[in-house]
Amino acid sequence: MTETGEQKTSQTLRKDPGQGLAGAATARGGGDPGSRGRTTIADGVVEKIAGLAARDVEGVHAMGGGLARTFGAVRDRVPGGSKSVTRGVKAEVGEVQTALDLEIVVEYGVAISDVAQDVRENVIAAVERMTGLEVVEVNLAVSDVKLPDEEDEDEPQGRLQ
């Protein structure tokens, strides 16, 4: 007791052996276990999610600029090589927000503004749903239009064996 007759309360948590684990969590005052600790999400994770979401949009032929697609097509043909889902996608990830830059190739005949809107909507929905991050912007650069009679450099060509 203090001079005024008030009892001092201890700032130290006491361990009550009879409470068990559930009581210990309550006594510790930790609250929701999901809020303990930090979760960090790598830029590459967001880039993969955004790349897959963008490719799902009708009218998007490919991702990335000409040079990136050329190198990607060569890499895809190498045994053991795989398609890069992050080609044409750049993400900046903070603690609670992310911003994305995408470079796409559209099919000839589609309305680019409609495809751009659909890509933004699909990418934002997928990234926010899967990561919990707020997508503050999705910048799109349309680098090319795939004409119907153009050879597709992303698909492997037949070879004589």
Image (cartoon, helix red, strand yellow):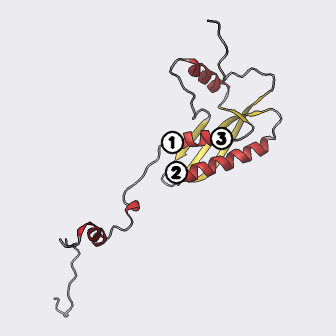
Left or right of 35, for residue 63 = right
37, 4: nearer the viewer:
37
Identify the image quadrant of residue 90. top right
How far apart are labels 3 and 2 at the CA level?
16 Å
Q: Residue at the location (64% across, 25% down)?
A: 69
Amino acid marked by disc 3? Ala
User: Can you tell which mark lies on residue 131?
Assistant: 2
Q: Residue at the location (60% across, 44% down)?
A: 100
Would you call the spot at circle 1 few (<14 residues within 10 Å), some (14-19), or many (20 or more)? some
Pick whichever of labels 1 and 3 is earlier in the sequence. Answer: 1
The residue beneath circle 1 is: 45
Q: Is residue 78 above or below residue 137?
A: above
Q: Residue at the location (19% across, 71% down)?
A: 15
The residue beneath circle 3 is: 54
Q: Is residue 155 above or below residue 160?
A: below
Secondary structure type for disc 2: helix
Amino acid marked by disc 1? Val
How far apart are labels 1 and 3 at the CA level?
14 Å
Amino acid marked by disc 2? Thr
